[in-house]
């Protein structure tokens, strides 16, 4: 068990089932979701009666891989829950075609199973739409939003969107018809800023090898079709963490999302899409979460 210090937080600790060489991570456990299957969450208790943040990772990542730099920092202020999204790492497996809406429903069932009240949904990249959909589909479980390196739609032009959808649909269709790959290729050295040698790249690659290849390819297609035309209806406190040097999610799209959401605050990071893997990410994310918590819970 993790040891709870005097300030009420629970220090993170690597579980015995983690691949070697990775960072200290919160304890994780499998949870059975009624009628859906088994998912996996990492949890930190945080201070007594603290609000809860639900951390939703990006495409090809996992709860541990996306958020390992921020667990300890956030746990000083919040209860932290970080699930693996369906098809990713230890997340839920399904024969259904991957849909972001189903991921939001999975999150809702997870919160019900854990017995937590309304949460601040914190979404990074692909996790942003999942957080948005959690608000849209399960308003009673969402007290606020923190949307990081994400947008309300990822392929802005109609022509580009149709081309992207066609490519992703073809790839996804091929994997469903043919034999599925037994494992996802190892992460290239540039996938995360860990350097080209040492234990961290090997840990990241081992985490990615847990993915269901068919489902993550379908997730790419689902991302390319996503477009939230209803952002102006969001009625919970929201913060946008904007990565101003992002080459994966254009900063223009991030700013447009922030402008579309009523009273959303902006928190800029002068970095790219992989800022989540740097220790410097923890402070601006904490400030954004505290901003939303202050407005949501007073």
Image (spheres, rainbow, N blue to C red):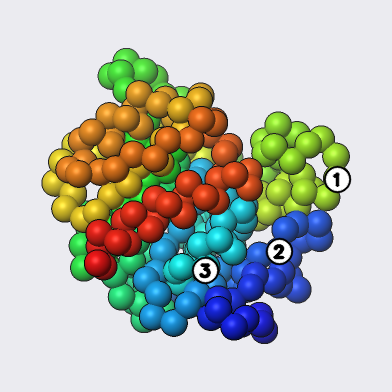
Q: Residue furthest right?
A: 198
Q: To which residue does mark 1 refer?
A: 198
User: What element does badge 3 sit on?
Assistant: loop
Crowd around label 1: few <14 · some 14–19 · many ≥20 (10 Å): few
Q: Quadrant of the N terminus?
A: bottom right
Which residue is rendered at x = 37% and y = 46% of the image?
A: 147
Q: Quadrant of the C terminus?
A: bottom left
- Which corner quadrant of the image does residue 13 belong to? bottom right
Do residues under tags 1 and 2 come within 8 Å of each other at their CB atoms?
no
- Among numbered discs 3 and 1, the one appearing first in the sequence: 3
Q: From mark 3 to mark 2, how far is it between C-alphas?
A: 16 Å
Q: Nearer the viewer, residue 15 or 212?
A: 15
Q: Where residue 170 sits: x, y (%)?
A: 47, 29
Q: From mark 1 to mark 2, how far is it between C-alphas?
A: 16 Å
Q: Is residue 277 left or right of residue 273?
A: right
- The numbered mark at residue 269 is none
Q: Where residue 61 sits: x, y (%)?
A: 57, 48
- The numbered mark at residue 24 is 2
Which residue is rendered at x = 25% and y = 43% of the image?
A: 264
Q: From mark 3 to mark 1, how far is it between C-alphas?
A: 30 Å
- Among numbered discs 1 and 2, the one appearing first in the sequence: 2
Q: To which residue does mark 3 refer?
A: 76
Q: Nearer the viewer, residue 199 or 181?
A: 199
Q: Nearer the viewer, residue 24 or 174?
A: 24
Q: Nearer the viewer, residue 285 or 80?
A: 285
- Among numbered discs 3 and 2, the one appearing first in the sequence: 2
Q: Where residue 259 sits: x, y (%)?
A: 23, 33
Q: Is residue 157 above or below residue 193?
A: above
Q: Where residue 32 sits: x, y (%)?
A: 47, 77
Q: Is residue 143 above or below residue 45?
A: above
């Amino acid at each position: 068990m993790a040891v709870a210090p005097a300030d009420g937080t629970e220090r993170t600790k690597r579980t015995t089932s983690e691949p070697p060489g990775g960072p200290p991570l919160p304890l994780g456990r499998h949870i059975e979701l009624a009628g859906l299957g088994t998912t996996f969450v990492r949890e930190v208790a945080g201070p007594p009666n603290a609000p809860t943040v639900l951390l939703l990772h990006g495409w090809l990542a996992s709860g541990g891989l996306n958020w390992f730099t921020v667990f300890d920092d956030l746990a000083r202020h919040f209860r932290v829950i970080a699930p693996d999204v369906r098809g990713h790492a230890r997340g839920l497996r399904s024969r259904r075609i991957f849909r972001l809406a189903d991921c939001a429903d999975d999150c809702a069932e997870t919160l019900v199973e854990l017995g937590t009240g309304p949460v601040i949904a914190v979404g990074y990249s692909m996790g942003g739409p999942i957080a948005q959909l959690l608000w849209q589909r399960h308003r009673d479980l969402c007290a606020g939003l923190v949307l990081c390196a994400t947008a309300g739609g990822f392929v802005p032009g109609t022509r580009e969107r149709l081309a992207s959808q066609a490519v992703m649909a073809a790839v996804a269709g091929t994997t469903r018809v043919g034999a599925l790959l037994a494992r996802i290729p190892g992460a290239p050295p540039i996938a995360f800023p860990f350097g080209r040698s040492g234990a961290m790249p090997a840990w990241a690659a081992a985490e990615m090898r847990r993915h269901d290849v068919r489902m993550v390819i379908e997730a790419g297609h689902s991302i390319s079709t996503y477009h939230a035309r209803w952002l102006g209806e969001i009625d919970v406190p929201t913060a946008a963490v904007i990565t101003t040097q992002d080459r994966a999610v254009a900063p223009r799209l991030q700013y447009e999302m922030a402008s579309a959401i009523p009273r959303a605050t902006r928190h800029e990071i002068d970095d790219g899409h992989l800022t989540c893997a740097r220790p410097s990410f923890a402070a601006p994310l904490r400030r954004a979460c505290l901003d939303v918590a202050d407005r949501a819970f007073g």
